Image (cartoon, helix red, strand yellow):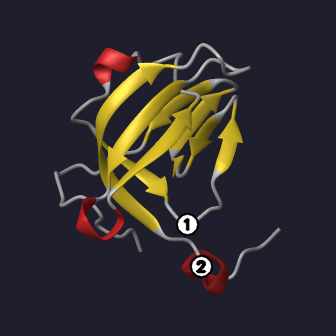
Amino acid sequence: MTASIDDFMKLDIRIGTVISANPFPEARTPAIKLEIDFGEELGIRKSSAQITKRYSPEDLPGRQVVAVVNFPAMRIAGFKSEVLVLGGVPDEGDVVLLKPDQAVPNGTKIS
């Protein structure tokens, strides 16, 4: 399936900084609950991320991540996940988080 540039432009992809990360044992698939600061315009958003193969909650605060911020929120085991954190998937169940190679302000747009 081919996507158009118009399809890409519909996505709002931003950089944010993880401010808290906690285990999410209620999730069906192992996950971590994240609170991510996307700056003044968007504020703090929550995400459930299936990233437990490579990351533990202690590893994540202070780390910048890339996320789609304009998908509809999803309820996961009673938790409202508001953004989709992006990563590479070398194998099933294995996610390597995307991050900028230099620090940028929270809320920086990806284009």
- Under circle 2, the secondary element is loop
Between the C-alphas of marks 2 and 1, the distance is 9 Å
Q: Nearer the viewer, residue 42 or 14?
A: 42
Q: Amino acid at mark 1?
A: Asn
**Nearer the N terminus, badge 2 or badge 1?**
2
Residue 42, percent across and down? Answer: 36, 65
At 69% from the left and 42% from the top, the residue drawn is: 75
For disc 2, the marked residue is 10
Residue 110, percent across and down? Answer: 39, 68
Look at discs 2 and 1 and give the one toward the viewer: 1
At 21% from the left and 35% from the top, the residue drawn is: 62
Q: Quadrant of the C terminus?
A: bottom left
Crowding near pointer 1: few (<14 within 10 Å), some, many (20+)?
A: some
| 98 over 4 or under it: above or below | above
Crowding near pointer 2: few (<14 within 10 Å), some, many (20+)?
A: few
Query: Do labels 2 and 1 touch, CB within 8 Å?
Result: yes
Q: Is residue 110 left or right of residue 70?
A: left
Residue 34, percent across and down? Answer: 43, 34
For disc 1, the marked residue is 70
Residue 85, percent across and down? Answer: 50, 45
